[in-house]
Amino acid sequence: MTTTVRPTWSTSAVRPDHPDAVRLLREYMTEMVVRYHRRPALPGEVDEALTELPSNDLTDPSGLLLLAHHGVDLAGCAGLRWQPDWAELTRVFVRRQHRGAGGGAALLAAVEARARAAGADRIRLDTRNDLVEARALYARHGYVEIPAYSQGPYAEHWFEKRLR
């Protein structure tokens, strides 16, 4: 009898300019552009979005960026921006070939542990109407919809999870 060993999830903090982070953040933004416009990205459109919504603050002291590996494969990312007493979740992304294998849950657990360790009492996030899978993920993991706390151009739903 052959035993199948399933890959495990692991996360590590990196700077947003790390080559793997740059690659994943570009993939994330490409998907956000394509889904928002419901068409392929136009030349320069992803670069414009990366400039409009930069990730360079996802590093100490203003935040952090976690990369997720599924086994040895680079598979996803999630970021936190530090606010007084709370953290804002952003850039949650799992590569398509790793979806359905627990990566979203692993990333949420990792950012929640990091936020608790940093003294945050809650995590907040905003998301869009079309990101139905993300909204379902957050709800499954204890995030509840709250009134708007931000006014970003793509913010249509706001969530919060108490950590204590």
Image (cartoon, grey):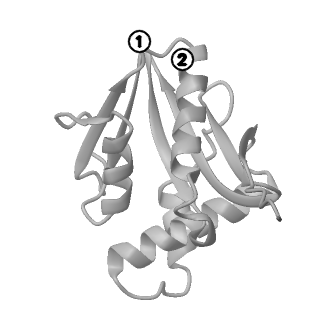
Q: Whole-percent x and y of residue 68?
A: 69, 49
For image coordinates 77% across by 61% down, the residue present is 4
Q: Nearer the viewer, residue 3 or 164?
A: 3
Residue 150 at least partly seen: no
Q: In the rendered image of this protein, does residue 96 appear above or below residue 78? A: below
Q: In the rendered image of this protein, does residue 122 appear above or below residue 81? A: above
For image coordinates 48% across by 45% down, the residue present is 90
Type of amino acid at the residue the image marks with label 2? Arg
Q: Residues within 10 Å of mark 2 (few under 14, many from 20)?
A: some
Tell me where residue 147 sits by quadrant: top left
Residue 49 at least partly seen: yes
The residue beneath circle 2 is: 116
Q: Whole-percent x and y of residue 142?
A: 34, 33
The residue beneath circle 1 is: 164
Q: Residues within 10 Å of mark 1 (few under 14, many from 20)?
A: few
Secondary element at image label 1: loop
Q: Are marks 1 and 2 in contact (CB under 8 Å)?
A: yes
Type of amino acid at the residue the image marks with label 1? Arg
Q: CA distance from mark 1 to mark 2?
A: 8 Å
Q: Whole-percent x and y of residue 73?
A: 78, 61
Relative placement, left or right, of 121 versus 58 is left
Q: Quadrant of the N terminus?
A: bottom right
Q: Nearer the viewer, residue 25 or 67?
A: 67
Secondary element at image label 2: helix
